[in-house]
Amino acid sequence: MMHRTLSIASRRRSFARLAPLLRRRAGWIVLLAIAGLANAGAGLVGPWAIGHLVDRLPAGAGPEVVWTCAVAVMVAGIVMALGTWIGAWALAHIAMPVVAELRTEVVDSALALESQRIEATGTGDLVSRVADDSRKISEAAAQVLPLVVESLLVVLVSAAGLAAVDWRLGIVGLVALPMYWLTLRWYLPRSEPIYKEERAAFGRRAGRLLGGLTGAATLRAYRAEGGEMRRIDAASGQARDLSINVFRFLTRAFGRNNRAEAVVLSLLLIAGFALVWFGESTAGAVTTAALVFHRLFNPIGALVGLFDQVQSAGASLTRMVGVIDEAHAAPRRTTTLGAVSPSLVLKDLWFSYDDDPDSDNHVLRGVSLRIEPGEHIAVVGTTGAGKTTLARIAAGLSAPTHGHAVLMGAGAASDRAAELTALGEPELRVHIAMIAQEVHTFSGTLRENVSLPHPAAADEAVMAALDAVGARWARSLPKGLDTEIGEGGARLSAVQEQTIALARLVLADPDFAILDEATAEAGSAGAHVLEGSAQAALEGRGALIVAHRLSQAEKADRILVMEHGQVIEEGSHDELVAGGGRYAALWQAWST
Amino acid sequence: MPRIPSSGSTLLTRAARRRLSLLLPGAVMLSLWQVCEALVPVAIGIVVDRAILPLSLPMLIVSILGIGVLFTVLSLGYRFGSRLCNAAREHEAHALRVEITHAALTSADLPADRTSGEVLSIASADADTAAMSFQQAGRGIASVLGMITAAVFLLVADPVTGLVVLVAVPIGLIIVALPGRSVSAKATAQLDAVARAGRSASDLMHGLRVIKAMGGEDWAVHRYRQTSDDAAAAGIATGERTGRLAGLGALVMSAVLAIVLIVAGLRLIDGQMSVGALIGILGMTAFLTEPMRALAEIVGLFAQSHGAAERIARLLADIAAEAEPETPEAAAPLPTVTLSESAVIVAGWPDGDDEIITTFGELTCIVTDTAEHGAELLAALSTHARGLGPETMIVAPHDTDLFEGTIRSNITMVVGADDQVHTDDRVTAEVLAASGTDELLGLVDGGLDHRIQELGGNLSGGQRQRVALARALSADPAVLVLVEPTTAVDAVTEARIAQGVSRLRRDAGRRATVILTSSPAFLAAADIVVHVPATGPILRGRHSELLAGDDAAAAAYRRAVTR
């Protein structure tokens, strides 16, 4: 089995992706910088005013100093109000569209990945990157980013303010830097593994809960609830213990912060005392310096506390950019065919899931097949015979290891041919569409679900497609095509979900349809209905049908019987039954 | 069994009572921390007033020592106070989670209107949110005590200025808090929009194969772009609103500071106040906003916790109600199931007088034309099975639930809390062959000890069905009921399985097997087939006899089972 994962971009690469998005918003960035600096600067007026009063009032100044200071504080308040407001506004105009573009591009890229690549990595990794990582980034942009930006500006401006009050006090304040740096150096390498462990425990707990609760009916049937409950309790207990440990660790980091605060504040006061002693500075200046530093407690605490979230948002970014880069690096499908009603020709197909080209672990061993327009071909065989792989190659979703899968023009255009995996996707899907094993109903209206191949299709066309496959239930829905289905919407039966897939096929109206076990999960009664629907959907087009039920094969023009990646019998139903081979035996077992 | 809390409030009260030993010391220490935080600006004022202005070295030394003590108490108060409150929260969340899952798994069935997804969300998110109330309680108490300390200091330091502060600060906060609700509504709307975009992305990725196979890439990108752009627009609106509110807050607090500064400055000129008191009062004015804002936030968060607690209480009550003996009107004329010495008898199904008898030692297949009939019979059989041990009767559901572990642990249904794989549990070769699992074992690494992911995600539908069938056969109950066990298995394998199941159950001796299916493979292997048409009398006989009949009933049977 293969376990190649999608790539992860380097940090440099990720920022390079962000840069052009940010450059387009340079105006907003300038506005943010101006507003943020004005806001942080105005915040220094309060401590300055207090220090000023400390110096002037005991020296016998009159009430006019008090009034001046009050006016200064008030003006600073107005600047802060405007700065805060405009800054937040500008930041939202930078962060939100950038994040939106990023997450749309990830979805876009994921959709552009070759199916084969997705099969090799599994959809799990992709789901987690496209859904979870982009959600994390979006939340971080909304909640963490504003705090980080504001805190950073306040810290920078206050440091400058401290130096402006007295450069010697500013130097003392610099002692804070190595202290906080040491805290981070102590904190980060330790936090990463324990947070990772905690996240893993949360994942385990969620998995156990999901498994236990969705499998409740089976657990009850086998009276096996006890064991599963013990597993859930253990997973939850483990997650709890880890969370408690993580928090203990976090409070230790905060403790180190407090230590830095106490040390630097004391040093400031001692240095201030010395400066005042030697007549180099005033008590007011020392007061201002101490109050400015006090103002830094919260922003610095926030920066240290948010560091993890910033880091994890950064990790999400690298994972998202990894998907984007991979989609960009993939070779483009550029061939065109430009022929109407072509034939689908599969020549000497070999396929192996191993990377090694000389592997002898082949799922397909030299299968050849030609489907003419309008011809229906059924494939019969046991699990593992290679039916699904053949179907995927015929649909242009997988490339054969050896051999060719091509569309070949007819009549005057018979010299035209195009490899399926090189043909541009829009044109490919005009000719070939596939209904795969997995059925998925998207969360949205019935109309949206059916119109997947042609988003702009008119209501009449959508309804006609549903009618064509015998979906009478669609007409009896209270809200008709506007009925919400999929997750959170009206529940549909397995048969109804399959009919929607068939209706999509009718609306897509391709020359060839590839059907892979499309009636399997519907149960016997449903299968009857679906067979009729499928027959109607295949009307007038060529088809390759992976037949799960022999009645599907019976109606086909030609039947292939596959075993171990090879075609062992081929012919019409009557020929094969008369021939007395493998198919005849199957049919015998099936029909009595 | 503990009594079930009747409402969110009782659930929270019960929670508080059982975590009191953590919560109480936690709140006390947090309060200590908050009071010390309030005293930091005061301390700065005192140092300037007593040491720096008079240039007294001994006082400076005492002051620095004092700051050391203050920060030590502050730091330790926070460290241990918040740890205790956090521990209370984690323990309670775990306890609630365990309580909910136990209730959901041990009840006869989930209440009809509850999906397992809903229970999952209550057991994970709501349990956390409800327990979060402890942190809020701790912080809330600390904030109140912090404010009281500040108030006392202000009034002692200078009654007039103190009073001005104590009046101006709350008024300022009220002005800021008034539009706060609309902003938090906007923020919630934005989070919802982001969550919607996330759900949409996840939905598209889960349907990725469908999209690729049908050429729906443009459709998908278009759909997603819409939700994503909506989220961005909501984000911009929220950002602007939040900024406006924060700006208003800065303006109001500056006004308060200016007023206090005027009052304090004038009183200092009048000689009624010391420099230290001035620094302390002004510093504390700025500080006071912190606990007050925290308190306002806590009230909002507490409402969320209460809502979550309410949902938990309701779910627990619903499950408990489901477990109650049936109410008179619910005692519908379900078919009755009896196990005699020699047979399983289902009476009153599909109609009052009908009776279906399965003798021990026989394989019976039941074909129903309507899904309702099948569901009715299944419900009756499941209800009956619940009162018996797994060695007597098992009704295996059609949905094949696999659990994380190995193929072996999924067949034997024995798992330990420690995740230890019990490689010694026996699964017989006969069971593996009869269920068709033997073929699967050749395809995967590790055979029986192949790891199964959560929900069996790494096996195909047909493979899952075979493991589930092996599970049913391995349990070897006296009465086994199966429902369409091989819908996802190919025709060739299905025929082999049908014969295997029939042989295995027969060889095991006095075993009764009932299969609800219309698969010809099983019908052909059955000792007796019962056909229940939508209307009209039920039909019994061997598959070949029923097929060969020439009356209308036989024709109906042929229609039901030919495919």
Image (cartoon, coloured by chain):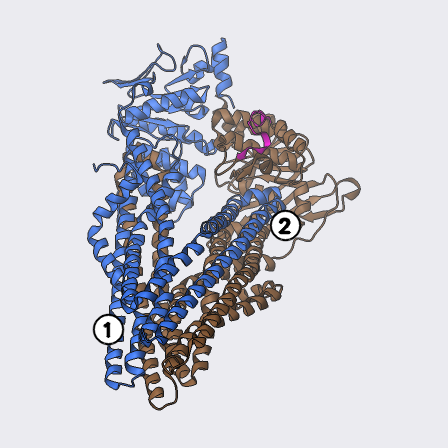
Question: Around disc 1, counting alpha carbons within 10 Å, would you say few (fewer than 14), some (14 to 19), or many (20 or more)?
Answer: some
Q: Is A483 one of the magenta-colored residues?
A: yes
Q: Is residue A320 left or right of residue B349?
A: right
Q: Position of residue B410 (x, y in %)?
A: 33, 41
Q: Nearer the viewer, mark 1 or mark 2?
A: 1
Q: Are marks 1 and 2 on the same chain?
A: no
Q: Residue furthest left?
A: B21
User: Which secondary structure, mark 2?
Assistant: loop
Q: Residue visible at 46% across and 81% down?
A: A164
Query: What span is colored magenta in the figure?
Result: A470-484
Can residue B403 be seen at all in this image of the molecule? Answer: no
Q: Amino acid at mark 1?
A: Val
Q: Which chain is blue?
A: B
Q: Residue visible at 28% across and 60% down?
A: B148
User: Which secondary structure, mark 1?
Assistant: helix
Q: Position of residue B550 (x, y in %)?
A: 50, 9
Q: Residue visible at 35% across and 75% down?
A: B270
Is the N terminus of chain B in the top left, top right, bottom left or bottom right quadrant? top left
Q: Which residue is mark 1?
A: B69
Proximity of marks 1 and 2: CB atoms separated by less than 8 Å: no
Q: Which one is nearer the viewer's eye here, A189 or B297? A: B297
Q: Is residue A264 left or right of residue A347?
A: left
Q: Position of residue A269 (x, y in %)?
A: 33, 81
Q: Amino acid at mark 2?
A: Thr
Q: Based on the displayed image, in which of its 4 quarters is residue A279 positioned?
A: bottom left
Q: Which chain is brown?
A: A
Q: Which residue is mark 2?
A: A421
Which chain is indicated by disc 2?
A
Image vertical order of residue B124 relative to residue A310, above or below: above
